[in-house]
Image: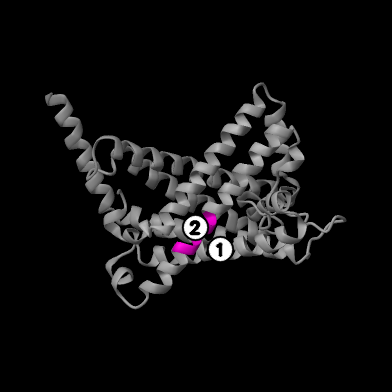
Amino acid sequence: MAERLDRATAATQWEWRARHSTLLEWSVRAGLVAYGSLHLLLAWVAVRLVWGHKAGPTGKGSGSATGQGALAQLAGDRLGRVLLVTMALMFTGLAVWQLIAALVGYRHDDGWKRLAMRLGAGSRVVAYGYFAVASARLAALGADASRQSPQSTTERVLNAPAGPLLLVGAGVVAAAVGIGLAVFGFAKGFVDQLDSKARNAERRVPIVVLGELGYVVKGLAFLVIGAVLVLAAVTGDPGKTGGLDQSLYELLGHSVGSIAVVVVGLGIGCFGLYLFARSWHLNEDSLTS
């Protein structure tokens, strides 16, 4: 019993230190700027693909409107590679932040709710860690990064033992995340992430609108990707998958899919702008909750 109390006391102390750490605070602010920049870059790539600046013989863009595909656009020159290394460091800061939250955060919750919130933080550790590794890897690959394809990854999974089941599982998880993001945005659950000035001042309305649109549209994008992954698993055709743009083409057809890519791209751009606003108006009390 005493040992359990000692562990709880130590966790509380670690949580308090993290919440009042200036280094962690500014690492989170910088990381949110990097994450917002990624979403703006993704929005730009998606819209540019639709307008045909990189159109291939079929009329579809040859790029990839995915997170890694958007980052790959930076890898072609020296300045872009420096930016990728910088973003890798910023994403690492976000991963450390969420790791702390997963280990000692959400002290005001208890039972299953605390467990669920910590598991959510753990999933964000994986996401931010992925972008950190992807940014560093793309910086190392340089111009060769643009040749990487999400379709090749899907093909490798399909050819693996139980590959279709793994792909269905990934699709279901992506769809579940999408539903969660959309509900969170629609319910304005993100408002507590902002400081009192953003919650109460005149700027609240534009920030909340950006956040609500961003979360809902990003959730819909995850739903689309999840549906296409399941479709690829059922048909056994890795060509059904690719970037977000190709996913929407597959589900909706070329003409309607083009409009959908623009709408989703603009929505994801809104989410990027919201992340900039959150970085500026970060609620320090929410660092570990």
Asked if residue 106 lies left or right of residue 259, the reply is left
The answer to whether residue 139 is above or below residue 159 is below
Q: Which mark is residue 267?
A: 1
Q: Residue at x 33, y 63 (%)?
A: 194
Image quadrant assignment for residue 110: top left
Image quadrant assignment for residue 7: top left
Label 2 packing within 10 angstroms: few (<14), some (14-19), many (20+):
many
Label 1 packing within 10 angstroms: few (<14), some (14-19), many (20+):
many
Task: Give the mark nearest the N terminus, 1 or 2.
Answer: 2
Q: Which mark is residue 216?
A: 2
Asked if residue 2 lies left or right of residue 70, the reply is left
The amino acid at mark 2 is Val
Q: Which mark is residue 133?
A: none
Please state which of residues 45 and 227 is positioned toward the viewer in this rendering. Answer: 227
The amino acid at mark 1 is Gly
| Outermost residue toward the right in this view | 57
Q: Is residue 217 magenta?
A: yes
Q: CA distance from mark 1 to mark 2?
A: 8 Å
Q: Which residues are magenta?
A: 212-218
**Colour basis:** one colour
Place of residue 174 in the rendered image (x, y in percent of width and height, measured from the top left): 55, 42
